[in-house]
Image: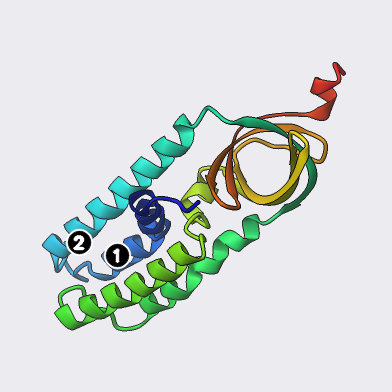
Amino acid sequence: MKIKFIPALLMFVSSYFPLALIFIIKDLDDTTFFPMHPITESIVATAVLLACAVVLVAAHTIESGVPVKVTKVSNKSGDMFTYTIPYMISFFNFNLGDWKTLLSLLVFMSLMFALAYRTQNVFINPVLALAGYGLYDCQFKDGGREVQGLLISKHEFQLGDTCVVERLSNYLYFVSNAQSKEKNNGG
């Protein structure tokens, strides 16, 4: 099971919201503070803001899933910072008006997307982290079987808690609800 192309692309584009903001700031005229390439900036800003909005709304609206009991958990939210390599580009002389630079960036980002999509790492997303979501490597019981996977969650949970998870891909799940083991035991 692999995440569909369009949702994966939206996740990928939204994860580079900060990079787009850096490019837009770097393209401001030093004296007037107006964009030097307003059409390019508008396209970039619109694409990234739309992707962020769709991703955040989609994450907020997931309510279904299967209850599972967490048997092992480790926080992997720090992995959300592994996307930073393309940010190095912003510290070089980058011109939004140069078609070769834009084409080079498009080729590079296309390669990054292809790798992220192929490896199912499109969910390592700083926009979700900024919205309060964490990434957790978990083992949990789904009925009688033990499952290993990554959970994206805005809900706090720990070992022994019950989480309601929606499967997004082979090893990736979204937590729509979590109940602590104390609450489950009536305590």
Residue 58 in the image, given as x and y percentages of width and height: 42, 37
Callout 1 crowding tier (Cα within 10 Å): few <14, some 14–19, many ≥20: some
Corner quadrant of residue 108: bottom left
Q: Residue at x 38, y 54 (%)?
A: 14
Residue for badge 1: 25
Q: In front: 14, or 92?
A: 14
Residue for badge 2: 41
Please determine whether, in this image, residue 22 is positioned above or below residue 177: below
Residue 103 in the image, given as x and y percentages of width and height: 21, 77
Relative placement, left or right, of 95 versus 170 is: left
Residue 176 in the image, given as x and y percentages of width and height: 58, 32
The first of marks 1 and 2 along the sequence is 1
Q: In front: 84, or 146?
A: 146
Relative placement, left or right, of 153 versus 19 is: right
Q: Residue at x 60, y 38 (%)?
A: 154
Amino acid type, residue under disc 2 in the picture: Glu
Q: Residue at x 87, y 18 (%)?
A: 187
Relative placement, left or right, of 72 versus 79 is: right
Corner quadrant of residue 90: bottom left
